[in-house]
Amino acid sequence: MNNINELYDILGIRHQKNLVDLIEEKKALLNIKTNIHLAAILSINKDTLSRIIKNEDYKIDIVSLIKLANFLELDVDKVVSAYIANTTKEIIEEIEHSKKASFIANNFDLNGLEKINFIKDKSNIIDIEHRIVDFFGLKSIYDYKENFAYSLFSKSKLKSQDFMNEFWIKCAYNQFNRIQNNNDFSVERLEDMVTKIRPYTLNIDTGLLTIVRALFNIGITVIVQDYISKTAVFGASFFINNKPCIVLTNHYKRYDLLWFTLFHELAHIIFDLEELKSQKFHLSGMADLLLLNEERANRFAEEMLFNEDKLNYISSNINNYNLVKAYAERNYVHPSIIYGFYIKKNSNKEEHYKRYSKYLISSEQAIAPLKSNIWDYDKNVQLELEKILDKINA
């Protein structure tokens, strides 16, 4: 920062009297003629007081500072600001650097950000500051809290998982704000479309992409944003720029869960739109303040994909993959979804997962056209999003 006045503005001291002026005014008021007399009154070494007045000792000791504050009848923090107001640009910059470093340490999980390659060196505060400001399009690092002051993160003491949850949400917001979906949205159009989605689960390569395109055309933006360790977010619904938005995390990297999550979030848009408009976002997979009906969203996803009656019907033949596959095709659903539901519904989930997980396929192929590397330090977030938008609009 080149302008000393900008530094003063940041620290709130630009228009404040400096400490020397305050001391001289008080001496005149009390008819104290010399600094030697003042040093005696304050019980401060006269040479120490001289260095303070001449601004030669910027690392003033706390005891002397308290004594001056008592003499001036001011709070200690005001005396500190008054002293800084008369100091050098270099000292101001040192203090501001420390302030930024403290802000970053108190609002980010640097180990977590380094792990996902969002930052290169967790000890390089200047580089971290520039990375965050550029990524989110902020005017200053302090806008990270000002622009995203959501109640979910208003606790006085946040843990590293809270920092990563907050970062994850703000990354999603950042993407949705950059993506311009100009298509009109209405719940009626979504309700008409949602019953037609299931057959696209049979197409592993382009089924999800086709549905994301269709949803985009009716005003709903869907992105895939990687799951981050400690976040516990499986999916999320947002309401941004008067449009509903969905994030799929691809947690567990299972094809069946990817589709289940999509229908779960669509349920929130259909049934909980007013709450979303009010609260702006809802996270599925962790507790938040919105407390939407998760069970209803789960039942909706199950009904849309493969309802309980159909699951009960095929359960007696669950060991015969060919029969399950044929039944799945007749019901226009991928067989891995049947096995996923069967494992979920069974009380002995662990044992059944070991037995039937071979029928659960990876979701990587399905999300490949929609994946971006927005967190990669060496990638440009806008260019990454433009690649995805080109595929959606193709």
Image (cartoon, rainbow, N blue to C red):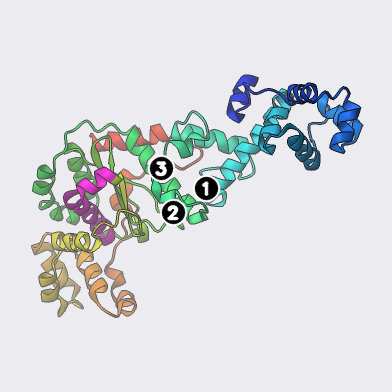
Residue 31 in the image: state x and y as whole percent: 82, 23
Q: Looking at the picture, which amino acid does disc 2 mark?
A: Ile
Q: Do the residues labelled 3 and 2 touch (CB within 8 Å)?
A: no
Q: In this view, does 42 lie above or below 365?
A: above
Percent coordinates x, y for residue 274 in the rendering: 21, 46
Say whether residue 3 is visible.
no
Secondary structure category for the residue under label 2: loop
Q: Name the residue under label 3.
A: 170
Nearest the viewer among 371 and 321 is 371
Label 3 neighbour load within 10 Å: few <14, some 14-19, many 20+: some
Q: Which span of residues is magenta-colored?
A: 256-278
The kind of residue tagged 1 is: Leu
Local packing at callout 2 (Cα closer than 10 Å; few below 14, some 14-19, many 20+) is many
Look at label 3 and name its amino acid. Lys
Distance between the alpha carbons at the discs numbered 1 and 2: 10 Å
Q: Residue at 81% of width from left, 38% of height from top?
A: 64
Distance Cα–Cα, label 3 vs label 2: 13 Å
Toward which corner of the image does residue 74 lie, by quadrant? top right
Q: Is residue 122 visible?
A: yes
* Position of 389 relative to 371 (above/below): above
Question: Most prominent secondary structure in the magenta stretch?
Answer: helix
Q: Is mark 1 on a helix, strand or loop?
A: helix
Mark earlier in primary sequence (3, 2): 3
Q: Quadrant of residue 67?
A: top right
364 left or right of 73 in image: left
**Mark 1 = which residue?**
113
Q: Position of residue 394 (x, y in %)?
A: 23, 34
Sort mark 1 into few (<14), some (14-19) or many (20+) by Cα contacts within 10 Å: many
Q: Does the magenta stretch include residue 338?
A: no
Q: Which of 231 and 206 is in front in this view?
A: 231
Give me the residue at 89% from left, 34% from top: 40
* Mark 2 lies on residue: 228
